[in-house]
Structure formats: C-alpha cells, structure tokens
Amino acid sequence: MKFKGKVAIVSGGARDIGRAVSLKLAAEGAKVVIGYLGDTAKAEETLQMIKANGGEAIIVAADVTKAIEVQQLVAEAQKAFGNEINILVNVAGGLVARKLIEDMDEEFWDFVMNVNAKTVFLTTKYVSPHMPKGSAIVNFASQAARDGGGFGASAYSTGKGAVATFTRSMAKELGPKGIRVNAVNPGMIATTFHDTFTKPEVRTAVANGTPLRREGQASEVADLVAYLASNECSFITGANIDINGGTYFS
C-alpha cells in the first residue's frame, strides 16, 4: 500500500494502459480520479473494478485539451478527496490517424498536437499548484518520440517528442518545489491502439523482432508508472524511460 492516503489523477484512465494504471495505483492505496472522454461505459467499468477490490475512485468526464475542463477535473478531485493531489499521470493522447504530410492539413496537425502535447501542458499547469513536496508527475511519451514513429505517424511522434522535452523542462522547473517529473516511452504494447492503427502482420513482425519476442502488456507499463510515482524513485526526475522489450535502445 505504497500510496495509502495519496490522491492520484489519471487522465485517459478508463481503458487500456490508462485503466491498468488506475487499477495499479488504487491497489496500492491511492484514491484515484479517473479522467476520461467519451466512453462512459468503459469509465464505469474501470470504477467498478477498483471498488470490487476495495479501492477508492471517482470518474470525471473531461476534455483535457480545454483549460476550463481541466480546472473542473481538479475541482472534482478536490471535492471528493481534499485539496492536495500527490500523483498526476498523463495517459491521454493518441495517433488519431495515419497520414503522410501530403495528406495532412493544418487542422489535423493542430488537433494531434493538442491531444498529445497541449493536454500535458494544461494538466501540469492546473494540477501542480496543488501538489505538495514529494509528489510526482508521470507523462506518457512513446517509442515514437525516440525513433520518429511508424509510417504516417509524423504528427503523433512529434507530439510525443514534445512531451519528452516538456518532461525534462518541468523536472527542472518543479524540482525545487519537491515535485518529480518523469515520462515513460512504451513500444509495442497489446492495446486497442494497435488493434486500430497497426496491421496484424506488422505487430507480429515487431514482436518477433524484439529480444523478448513478444508484445508488452498494459500491466507491465502500469508497474513502471507506479515505480516512478513512488518514493522508491525519489532521486529520479527528468527521465524518459523506455519500455519496449529491447526493440529500441535510447
């Protein structure tokens, strides 16, 4: 119960890796605020999974590309669990679609940047003032931020690259306040992201090309997030940690 008495906000916390993170933090004693957009059924399902295991959580619908909705997310967290927020995990993001630069318009580029980078800026801006010394922020970048991403993923990889850089900047800015900021860079993880955007033969080839010869699991990413959010990681900040089965070495 390493997070007993702590409050955690997980943006995009209702499904896939976000769900695994929410479940892991709750299992370790955190009171979890599950931010989600759109799929209320998934959010409710995640909430009930936490409650069934004796955990505490609430769900809050919020479009974290919008400042007012991020502020409302924070307000709901404080209404439910008190003023202090100890952990912020920024999972919200997405590829949206695979498009070559010749097929992209300005609106698409801006939307992908907002979904992946602006979200992290806004949550950090509005949550960090309520984080006491010893708190932690864990962002989600991607292996794409390291290697440029797959075919048609230039906007996504650029957005995630911004997250990786913002993580380093915030580690410097928030460190004197006792807040650590790190990021994880998942590779091929078995989620609906790849069910939607990656062809089965590509997934198989990537998995077989890793030293461990498999895809990762959302629970394995959640374990890393929990470590980075914990006091066991008290002298690590500004790190972008790869979790990809050895596919890519930074």
Image (spheres, rainbow, N blue to C red):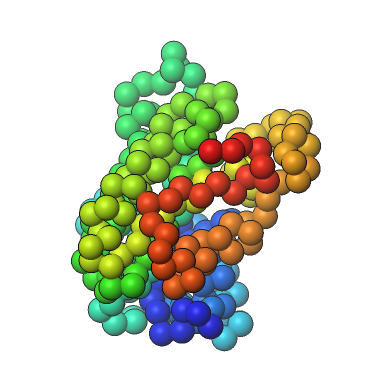
Left or right side of 61 for 223: right
- Is 11 left or right of 190, judged from the image as shown? left
- Residue at the front extreme of this rendering: 235
- Say left or right for 167 vs 4: left
Up/down of 89 relative to 147, above or below: below
Q: Quadrant of residue 244?
A: top right
> In the image shown, does 52 or 217 lie closer to the viewer?
217
Determine the residue positioned at 44% across, 73% down: 231
| Quarter-of-image position of residue 180 | bottom left
Q: Is 179 placed above or below 168 here?
A: below
Q: Position of residue 74 (x, y in %)?
A: 28, 68
Whether residue 11 is visible here, answered yes or no, is no
Residue 131, percent across and down?
Answer: 27, 70
Residue nearest the observer in this picture, 51 or 44: 51
**x, y percent for residue 40:** 49, 62
Residue at 34%, 47% in the rendered image? 168
Q: Is residue 169 above or below residue 37?
A: above
Tell me the residue at 53%/83% (across/down): 1
Across and down, in percent, residue 73 comes to: 31, 65
Number of numbered tags placed on the structure image: 0
Residue at (38, 76) in percent of width and height? 7
